[in-house]
Image (spheres, rainbow, N blue to C red):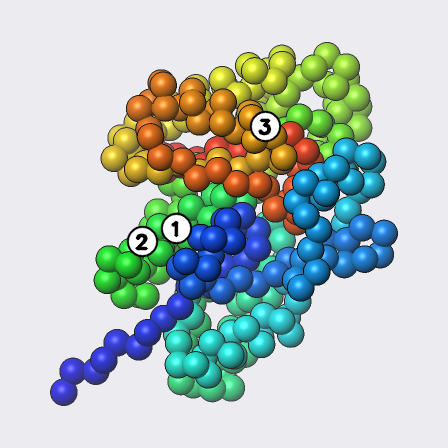
């Protein structure tokens, strides 16, 4: 007798930055990360409108952030398991948040308590729509009939080919997060320096170089992409772009990519509050498959 393969469901974090319409269409379950303004916590059932969130930051009101709550993660995983699903969880990069560790601990505890439960947690080593693009790849593979184990194997083998390159408009947000020094932030702001950063193989934010001016920064993102997609042209049927409430710049970036690289399909969405708290308004981030991060 052939055992029937158990149905599985894909879960991820709010930091994947996928549009709610995409989440609902593909039945993805999401673990919330949190942010707070003035002692009010948002991120689960209570949320600010995304433009209101960025307007608060522009006015100088700085949020704090919190990882996934273990009890919430347990309840979501347990409810799905009780519905008969195996669970494939694609988590926010572990060096950037404790959320991956929370998911791993909850999954391990549940599988020990209930041997019939199967939960696989992938440390994506990705952020924002980089994490979202990895989720998208898993969704497309599931739709094509791949098993959970096959998808897990592909994700682990290919996640370091998922490139993240981005720029920020205000260096002071990176300074608050400890990414650059206060002196660097002040001097850089005075001379209109825009840093180009990426997420490296360890899943950390790392500076690549600096350019003068916003337009040159956006052009630099496409220059870097052009080098990194060599050999991976056929892996980029769609490119993801996230932005910190600067849709016009995101569309400009997409138009440059279309003109220079011939890519037609884009998914563009906001950088969610948990990540936007650290990157700030004006962030532009580009995600695609490439030969190296």
Contact? badges 3 and 2 (CB < 8 Å): no
Residue 57 image position (x, y, % from top left): 76, 38
Specify the quadrant of the image occupied by residue 101: bottom right
Q: Residue at x 62, y 71 (%)?
A: 72
Q: Is residue 175 left or right of residue 149?
A: right
Image quarter of the C terminus = top left
Can residue 275 be seen at all in this image of the molecule?
A: yes
> Which is more foreground, mark 3 or mark 1?
1
- Mark 1: secondary structure: helix
- Mark 2: secondary structure: helix
Q: CA distance from mark 3 to mark 1?
A: 23 Å
Specify the quadrant of the image occupied by residue 182: top right
Image quarter of the N terminus = bottom left
Residue labelled with disc 2: 140
Residue 97 image position (x, y, % from top left): 62, 53
Residue labelled with disc 1: 136
Q: Which mark is first along the chain, 1 or 3? A: 1
Q: Which of these two is toward me, 207 or 165?
A: 165
Residue labelled with disc 3: 167
Q: Residue at x 55, y 66 (%)?
A: 103
- Rendered view: 195 above or below 152: above
Q: Is residue 58 left or right of residue 120?
A: right
- Mark 3: secondary structure: strand
Q: CA distance from mark 3 to mark 2?
A: 29 Å
- Rendered view: 152 above or below 207: below
Contact? badges 1 and 2 (CB < 8 Å): yes
Specify the quadrant of the image occupied by residue 173: top right
Most extreme residue toward the left, as rendered? 1
């Amino acid at each position: 007798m052939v055992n029937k393969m158990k149905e599985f469901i894909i879960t991820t974090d709010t930091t994947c930055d996928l549009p709610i319409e995409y989440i609902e269409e593909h039945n993805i379950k999401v673990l919330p990360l949190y942010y707070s303004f003035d002692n009010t916590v948002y991120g689960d059932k209570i949320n600010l409108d995304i433009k209101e969130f960025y307007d608060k930051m522009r006015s100088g009101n700085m949020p704090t952030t919190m990882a996934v709550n273990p009890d919430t993660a347990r309840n979501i995983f347990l409810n799905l398991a009780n519905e008969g699903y195996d669970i494939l969880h694609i988590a926010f990069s572990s060096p950037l948040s404790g959320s991956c560790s929370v998911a791993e601990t909850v999954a391990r505890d549940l599988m020990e308590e209930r041997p019939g439960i199967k939960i696989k947690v992938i440390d994506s080593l990705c952020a924002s729509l980089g994490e979202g693009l990895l989720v998208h790849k898993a969704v497309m593979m599931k739709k094509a009939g791949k098993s959970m184990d096959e998808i897990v194997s592909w994700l682990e083998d290919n996640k370091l080919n998922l490139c993240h390159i981005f720029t920020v408009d205000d260096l002071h947000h990176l300074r608050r997060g400890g990414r650059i020094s206060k002196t660097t932030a002040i001097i850089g702001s005075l001379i209109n320096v825009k840093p180009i950063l990426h997420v490296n193989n360890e899943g950390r934010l790392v500076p690549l170089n600096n350019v003068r001016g916003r337009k040159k920064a956006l052009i630099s993102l496409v220059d870097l992409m052009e080098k990194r997609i060599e050999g991976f042209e056929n892996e980029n049927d769609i490119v993801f772009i996230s932005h910190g409430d600067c849709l016009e710049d995101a569309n400009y970036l997409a138009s440059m990519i279309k003109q220079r690289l011939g890519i037609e399909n884009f998914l563009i969405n906001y950088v969610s509050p948990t990540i936007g708290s650290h990157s700030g308004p004006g962030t532009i981030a580009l995600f695609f498959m490439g030969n190296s991060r």
